[in-house]
Image: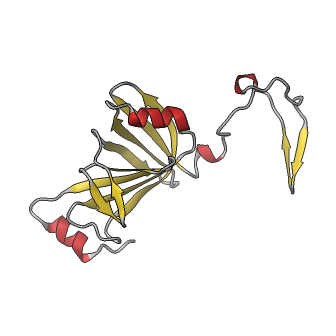
């Protein structure tokens, strides 16, 4: 169990609290967002952006995590990042904090996983999340075929040895 800092305990006991999520998505460069306006935490700037929401963060009994992040897309910035850089297996971290307690040790990491899929439209981007140890660890992040520009593929069943690992090619 994690011990909360005095600042976090004090903020939680206040009459008015300022809950927020800090979201870091592993784009190049990293996209750092805050659900409560622009903030500075851990010597980094976190942008309030447009209509940012974190929902359905959950972990089952086996430790599998899931959740959803919705980000406003009226300026097409996040939608362009998603479409240009892709999202499959892109790392995501989410911390929960109070706006009055933002010392380095105050925010609590509540999600550490990857993006499993994205829905992009003109007003918002919705990212579905999965823990990094779940399905994403066993699924290829990219299928290579004719659509990727390859005209010649090795036959199904071909074995390729790399180090001590042998890969067998399959068709979908």
Instruction: Say which residue appears at 48% left-offset and 54% top-offset.
Output: 61
Of all residues shown, which one is farthest toward the left?
A: 15
Query: Considering depth in this image, is 107 or 66 the residue closer to the camera?
Result: 107
Picture quarter with the N terminus? bottom left
Q: Is residue 144 left or right of residue 151?
A: left
Instruction: Say which residue appears at 46% left-offset and 51% top-offset.
Output: 30
**Residue 156 at x, y = what percent?**
87, 30
Q: Is residue 116 left or right of residue 52?
A: right
Asked if 40 appears above or below 26 in the picture, the reply is: below
Q: Is residue 86 visible?
A: no
Query: Considering depth in this image, is 29 or 107 the residue closer to the camera?
Result: 29
Asked if 72 appears above or below 13 in the picture, the reply is: above
Count the numbered circles shown: 0
Query: Considering depth in this image, is 61 or 85 the residue closer to the camera?
Result: 85
Q: Is residue 13 visible?
A: yes
Q: Is residue 9 left or right of residue 43?
A: left
The color scheme shown is secondary structure
Instruction: Say which residue appears at 54% left-offset and 45% top-offset.
Output: 90
**Residue 163 at x, y = what percent?**
86, 56
Quarter-wise, where is residue 100 in the image?
bottom left
Picture quarter with the C terminus? top right
Instruction: Say which residue appears at 34% left-offset and 43% top-offset.
Output: 55
**Residue 43 at x, y = what percent?**
36, 66
**Residue 41 at x, y = what percent?**
33, 63
């Amino acid at each position: 169990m994690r011990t909360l800092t005095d600042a976090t305990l004090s903020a939680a006991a206040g009459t008015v609290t300022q809950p927020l999520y800090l979201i870091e998505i592993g784009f190049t460069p990293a996209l750092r967002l805050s659900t409560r306006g622009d903030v500075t935490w851990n010597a980094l700037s976190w942008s309030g952006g447009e209509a940012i929401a974190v929902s359905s963060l959950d972990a089952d009994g086996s430790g599998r995590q899931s959740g959803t992040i919705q980000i406003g897309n009226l300026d097409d910035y996040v939608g362009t990042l998603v479409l240009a850089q892709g999202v499959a297996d892109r790392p995501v971290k989410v911390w929960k904090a109070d706006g009055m307690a933002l010392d380095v040790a105050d925010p609590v990491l509540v999600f550490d996983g990857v993006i499993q899929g994205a829905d992009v439209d003109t007003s918002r981007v919705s990212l579905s999340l999965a823990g990094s140890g779940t399905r994403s660890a066993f699924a290829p992040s990219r299928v290579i075929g004719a659509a990727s520009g390859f005209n010649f593929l090795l036959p199904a069943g071909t074995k390729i040895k790399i180090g001590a690992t042998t890969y067998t090619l399959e068709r979908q």
